Image (cartoon, rainbow, N blue to C red):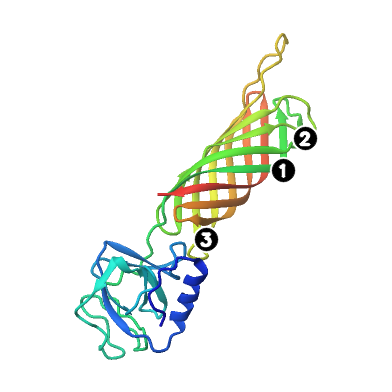
Amino acid sequence: MSTTTKSKSFPTLIALCFGTALASQARADDRTVIVAETIVHSAPIDVAPTIARLHGGDRVHADDQTIGPWRRVALADGRYGFVRDVETQHSDTSPANLPVGTPPTAAGAASVPASPGSVLVQGQQSSQPQADPHLLGVMFELLPFGTLAAKSATGASASSDGAFAISVAPFFDGALSPYIAFGLSPQVVLRVKPDGSSTESAKEFDLRARLTARLPLSAKARAFARFSPAYSIIVLPSAPGGSAQVDRPNPQGFLVDVSFGTEVAVLPNLFLVTDIGYQAGFQSSSDGDLHTSYLHIGAGFAVGF
């Protein structure tokens, strides 16, 4: 068993972590959580992944010595983790002598087979996963491949490749569950024009709602699939000054976007978001149709709250 150390260096903490995990003759101490909630980390550092949460009044069987400001505990499923020692205190009532296989008590205590450094946790938190934090952020997208399809009121049609476009889209996602979120993400697309054209670009404004399905990959990362219906407006450039031409009406209509990506926690409440997807618009005006479609790839960041 490693003794108390004041060292805060990352290598020393990791070495001590492995040393304690491999110790075969660990003594135990009964502790009670004295704060509303304490996080159980996979290693004795704040940035280590969260593997569980304990709540005020929960009793745990833990190592009798600390690792700096940390104390090792073992969860009911056999995993080991680390909590802040100041968030627990010595418990006078010991659950250590319960026989192997003792079922959960009415108070919610659960036991694991007896072994050095094993843990008993009372008041287990519900196995129902909690909703993820709501996210507020912004995405920056590259739209390297696109198509502009036009059809006049007389029936004449033409299609061309779109120029390399870019977009920016702030967003809000409200978590309905750990796996589903609903939100809004207005987007502005710049450089909407045929590839190689020297004319002034149009701008596209997409007023998007979005439904997101998430799949956790680890304690810090999750994948998602997203469906975003939108109302789209293409703002055409004004006619040149002094020209006899009149401004054309702006095409508008329905747009749909489907994308896939990841959200990775780089800090406890800061997420790096990446995605790839495809959007197709069905805009029209009294002058005819102007449909836009783009493949997009992007990255951004979000704050959880």
Q: Residue at horizontal 54%, vertical 49%?
A: 227
The percent position of residue 57, horizontal first and vertical second, equals: 23, 69
Q: Is residue 296 above or below residue 101?
A: above
Q: Which mark is residue 144?
A: 1
For marks 3 and 2 on the same chain, the one whose residue lies earlier in the sequence: 2
Q: Amino acid at mark 2?
A: Asp
Q: Is residue 25 left or right of residue 281?
A: left
Q: Which mark is residue 221?
A: 3
The percent position of residue 305, horizontal first and vertical second, equals: 40, 49
Q: Quadrant of residue 36?
A: bottom left
Residue 110, can we see it? no
For label 2, the crowd category at 10 Å Cα-Cα, with few meaning under 14, some 14 to 19 and many 20 or more, is: some
Mark in front: 3 vs 2: 3
Q: Quadrant of residue 45?
A: bottom left
Gap between marks 1 and 2 measured at Cα: 10 Å
Front residue (pair 182, 66): 66
For marks 1 and 3 on the same chain, the one whose residue lies earlier in the sequence: 1
Q: Amino acid at mark 1?
A: Pro
Q: Amino acid at mark 3?
A: Ala
Kindly identify which residue carries mark 2: 195
